[in-house]
Image (spheres, rainbow, N blue to C red):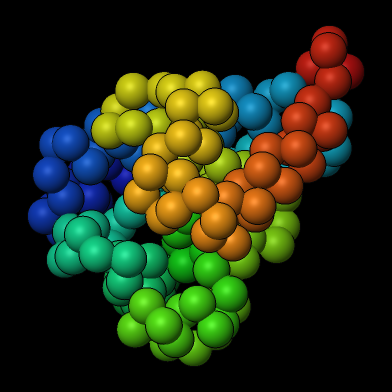
Amino acid sequence: MKNSCEILERLGCSKKIIAHTLAVSRVALSIADRVKIKVDRDLILKGALYHDIGRCRTHGIEHAVVGAKIARELGLSNSVIKIIERHIGAGITAEEAKDLGLPRKDYIPRTPEEKIVSYADNLINGSKEVSFEEALERFRNVLGRDHPSIRRFKEMHKEIQSWISSTGRS
């Protein structure tokens, strides 16, 4: 973790962004420890630590695309790059990406690791953990009550909750 934070700092990420990535990492690992499906905990940690690496250059929605480019330059694995690229919101379709000025492609989290990092990111406001209900309300306030991301976020929540067992992993 220390090495990742040093890289983020060297690239120019603010202390607030680094605190945010550490908070996302904590929540993502907590989720990973409670799910009953097999997940790559190391990948979740790396993805969570680097998910906002693009914020060293921009704070717009394009930070995911910029972050993926930086991650490629750093030689990070394709799995980590996909987490960086697909963590925004609860995922963005190719059509939505075009409307947002992003390269037209699908930014929907697909793997459990991608979904867990994206979900954990949405449960962190700054560096403070919030409930799903608070995060959902924030989505509605920012995007509007009928935005497709609202449905995707609810579906992501339901899916991740279905992976969690009451006793954790055995």
Relative image position of residue 148 (x, y in whole percent): 59, 61
Picture mark count: 0
Residue 66 in the image: x percent, y percent?
A: 30, 73
Taking the spot 14% from the left edge, 36% from the top edge, the residue there is 15
Q: Please, which residue is most extreme toward the front here?
A: 145
The image shows residue 111, relative to residue 156, as above or below, that is: below
Query: Can residue 27 be seen here?
Result: no
Judge by depth and name the residue closer to the eye, 56 or 91.
91
Q: Is residue 111 visible?
A: yes
Q: Quadrant of residue 11?
A: bottom left
User: Which residue is at 83% across, 33% downward?
Assistant: 162
The spot of residue 161 in percent (x, y) is 76, 30
Quadrant occupied by the N terminus: top left
Residue 107 vs residue 21: left or right? right
Q: Residue at x 38, y 43 (%)?
A: 141
Judge whether 98 appears above or below 15 on screen: below
Looking at the image, residue 161 sits to the left or right of residue 97; the answer is right
Quadrant housing residue 108: bottom right
Nearer the observer, 77 or 50? 50
State left or right for residue 135 relative to residue 166: left
The one nearer the camera, 156 or 117, is 156
Quarter of the image containing the C terminus? Answer: top right
Q: Residue at left 46%, top 45%? A: 140
| Location of residue 159 by image quarter | top right
